[in-house]
Amino acid sequence: MADDSFGVLLERLALSKRIDLVAAVQQAGMRSELEAVLRGGSPGSDLLRVLAPVLGWHAADVFALADVSLPDGLRSAGRSRGSGVPTLVRSFIALGPEQQAEVLQFVASMPAEGPTAPVRTPPHMVYPSGPGGILMRLIWNRGLAWSAIAQTLAVSTGRYWSAATYGGVPRFPEF
């Protein structure tokens, strides 16, 4: 990507979703901040929170795209960082389409719970800007650490890379 600034990424995303960002944030009184971001400025937390529903994304994912640290209220809670996800994915894949639809409907109907004790991002999981960094920040927002990523993708795709490989991909532009 020639220019991976948040403003460029935001414009591309809005174009693909056919969203008029300026009109969407005008009501929140953040037009000037948005225009500054589109010219290469850094976004503030308030703007990112306003953009999330406009884009149809979770606020934490907009923070990941912008490479802005998550506020405590958006950090996921938990100790395991996704260790049970590979088993859940394996079980889900084994279900038929009707049962999968039932599970998805049940999950969507569950109430959202806020974090009780936010998990801080360890230094080795702070990634540089770029596509790989964005992807890994989005995955971290899903509660998956490197080991859970490797196991989940092995279960769902049949392809296994070591956990450290997933951690290293964003650090090497030639990948």
Image: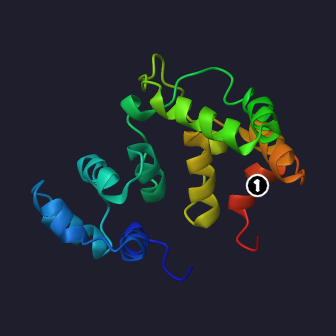
Amino acid type shown at disc 1: Gly
Residue 138 in view, yes or no: yes
Q: Is 65 or 108 nearer to us in this picture?
A: 108
- The residue at 28%/76% (across/down) is 39
Q: Residue furthest front?
A: 98
Q: Secondary structure at mark 1?
A: helix
Q: Is residue 87 above or below residue 59?
A: above
Q: Is 122 or 88 nearer to us in this picture?
A: 88
Looking at the rendered image, the quarter that the C terminus falls into is bottom right
Q: Residue furthest bottom?
A: 2
Crowd around label 1: few <14 · some 14–19 · many ≥20 (10 Å): some
Picture coordinates of residue 47, whole percent (x, y)? 25, 53
| Residue at the spot of label 1 | 168
Side of 123 where 147 appears, left or right: right
- The residue at 49%/34% (across/down) is 108
Among the 4 quarters of the image, the one containing residue 9: bottom left
Among the 4 quarters of the image, the one containing residue 152: top right
Side of 85 where 160 appears, left or right: right
- The residue at 40%/29% (across/down) is 72
Picture coordinates of residue 78, whole percent (x, y)? 59, 21
Question: What scheme was used to colour the molecule?
Answer: rainbow
- The residue at 39%/70% (across/down) is 17
Q: Residue furthest top?
A: 116
Q: Is 99 or 172 nearer to us in this picture?
A: 99
Looking at the rendered image, the quarter that the N terminus falls into is bottom right
Picture coordinates of residue 164, whole percent (x, y)? 82, 46
Residue 122 in view, yes or no: no
Picture coordinates of residue 167, whole percent (x, y)? 74, 49
